[in-house]
Image: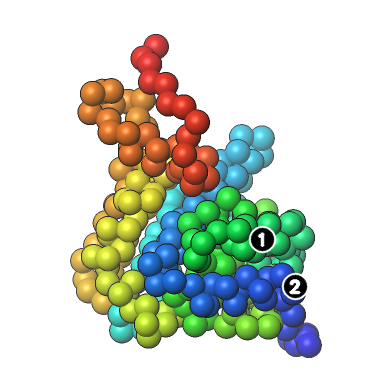
């Protein structure tokens, strides 16, 4: 169904995506915090893509030279927002990446879950479908995005059931804003102190600054991640878990590194 006034169109999820959404909605409580890790990883990936494209396309960065990730939370509105000023997405990108999943990542992840005991969802990012972990904590999700190479901007929205909507929507600057409407049983994530503990746990070495802002108070946004490469630190001050987290953050994978070698040139 399409609304020609604002190019509003209701589309049906690919069958495999519907299965994945059902899996997310019924996930274990202990796994839920990984949704933030996945969204931050996606934002960092978008920033990295823009930085790479800007090397060959002059002026692509425009006035926004600093690539960053902003996280905003409000208990009153019951929302969490994750925003980046990275490469952004076109209308077709939103459909391909969030609605149809042309790649085989969805099926592979579902099959992997069948071979594991319980509902261990920690490896979801390895399959390229980490965005859907949002539905572990959210009743509905909106994705507002503007491609760095286009004038138009679009809004993707879904309650995680059988369909999603894509429509034209106003956005001034490039990048993506993901808004989660948090479930009643997930309101722990509306606590800024809770988010302040989750972000460094998984995303401390993301190579872009991550800022956290509580929309319910007047305090300024706070930079949460360290973002300091390990090679600038003294080896004796680095713990084994620091190496693992650094590897996870720069590779966007969440397995164990095969081997760690530290040397100074």
Of label 2 and label 1, which has the lower sequence position? 2
In what element is the residue under mark 1? helix
At x 48% / y 57%, what residue is drawn? 122
**Alpha carbon of mark 2 to alpha carbon of mark 1: how far?**
16 Å
Q: Is residue 75 left or right of residue 22?
A: left
Mark 2: give few (<14), some (14-19) or many (20+) Cα within 10 Å: some
At x 42% / y 44%, what residue is drawn? 206
Q: Is residue 145 left or right of residue 205?
A: right
Mark 2 or 1: in front is 1
In percent of width and height, residue 187 lies at 33, 79
Name the residue that disc number 1 marks. Answer: 111
Question: What is the quadrant of residue 137 in the picture?
Answer: bottom left
In what element is the residue under mark 2? loop
- Location of residue 61 with respect to 143 vertically, above or below: above
In percent of width and height, residue 184 lies at 37, 85
Q: Is residue 157 left or right of residue 138?
A: right
At x 49% / y 52%, what residue is drawn? 41
């Amino acid at each position: 169904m399409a609304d020609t006034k604002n190019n509003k169109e209701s589309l049906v999820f690919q069958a495999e995506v519907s299965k994945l959404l059902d899996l997310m909605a019924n996930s274990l409580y202990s796994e839920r915090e990984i949704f933030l890790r996945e969204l931050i990883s996606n934002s960092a990936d978008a920033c990295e893509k823009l930085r790479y494209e800007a090397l060959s396309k002059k002026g692509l960065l425009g006035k926004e030279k600093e690539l960053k990730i902003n996280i905003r939370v409000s208990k009153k509105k019951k929302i969490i927002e994750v925003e980046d000023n990275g490469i952004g997405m076109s209308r077709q990108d939103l459909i391909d990446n969030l609605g149809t999943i042309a790649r085989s990542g969805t099926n592979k992840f579902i099959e992997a879950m069948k071979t594991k005991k319980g509902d261990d969802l920690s490896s979801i990012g390895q399959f390229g479908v980490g965005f859907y972990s949002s539905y572990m904590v959210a009743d509905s999700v909106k994705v507002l995005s503007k491609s760095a190479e286009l004038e138009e901007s679009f809004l993707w929205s879904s309650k995680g059931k059988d369909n999603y909507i894509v429509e034209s929507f106003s956005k001034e600057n490039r990048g993506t804003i993901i808004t989660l409407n948090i479930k009643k049983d997930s309101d722990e994530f509306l606590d800024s102190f809770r988010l302040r503990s989750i972000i460094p746990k998984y995303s401390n070495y993301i190579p872009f600054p991550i800022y956290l802002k509580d929309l319910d108070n007047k305090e300024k946004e706070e930079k949460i991640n360290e973002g300091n490469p390990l090679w600038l630190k003294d080896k004796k001050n680095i713990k084994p878990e620091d190496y693992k987290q650094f590897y996870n953050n720069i590779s966007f994978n969440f397995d164990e590194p095969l081997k760690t070698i530290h040397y100074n040139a």
